[in-house]
Image (cartoon, rainbow, N blue to C red):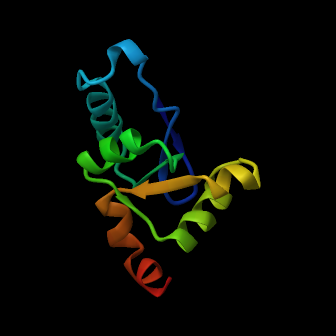
Amino acid sequence: MGIQYAQDATLIRHAYVCTVEKRHGIGGKLVSSLCKQTASPILIGTWADAVWAVHLCEKDGFRLVSQELNNRLLRKHWSIPERQIETSVVLANQKWFDLHETEAINL
């Protein structure tokens, strides 16, 4: 798991925990540690079907962005195929929502 600095946010990338180590709080500790390493807004992208990953992010205070904003953010910050954009979601921390409140509301 690591962070990547983007234009207006920090991305948490490659957030994986070995299957045998899941459900021990490791993922949450790693995300928390990464969040402490940056003062900028944070975005996390994951597969929409990875419900466990979405719940982990939500448990750590992240929220899903709107679908339209989701696709724009994936195209802006990630280099992924269109099919992956269709099957992915973006979660943002409260700092991101505070800074982009107008944009998020207008979509």
Q: Position of residue 60 (x, y in %)?
A: 25, 45
What residue is rendered at 27% in x and 36% in y? 32
Q: Is 60 placed left or right of 45 in the picture?
A: left
Residue 103, above or below 23: below
What residue is rendered at 75% in x and 55% in y? 82
Viewer-closest of 81 and 73: 81
What residue is rendered at 34% in x and 56% in y? 93
Residue 83, above or below 69: above
Q: Is 79 placed left or right of 36 in the picture?
A: right
| Number of numbered labels in the structure image | 0
**Residue found at the very far bottom of the displayed protein:** 106
Q: Position of residue 44 (x, y in %)?
A: 46, 48
Q: Quadrant of residue 27?
A: top left
What residue is rendered at 47% in x and 80% in y? 103
Residue 100, above or below 11: below
Q: Is 23 placed left or right of 96 in the picture?
A: left
Q: Position of residue 76 (x, y in %)?
A: 65, 60
Q: Position of residue 64 (x, y in %)?
A: 40, 61
**Residue found at the very far top of the displayed protein:** 20
Q: Is 73 placed left or right of 103 in the picture?
A: right
**Residue found at the very far right of the displayed protein:** 81
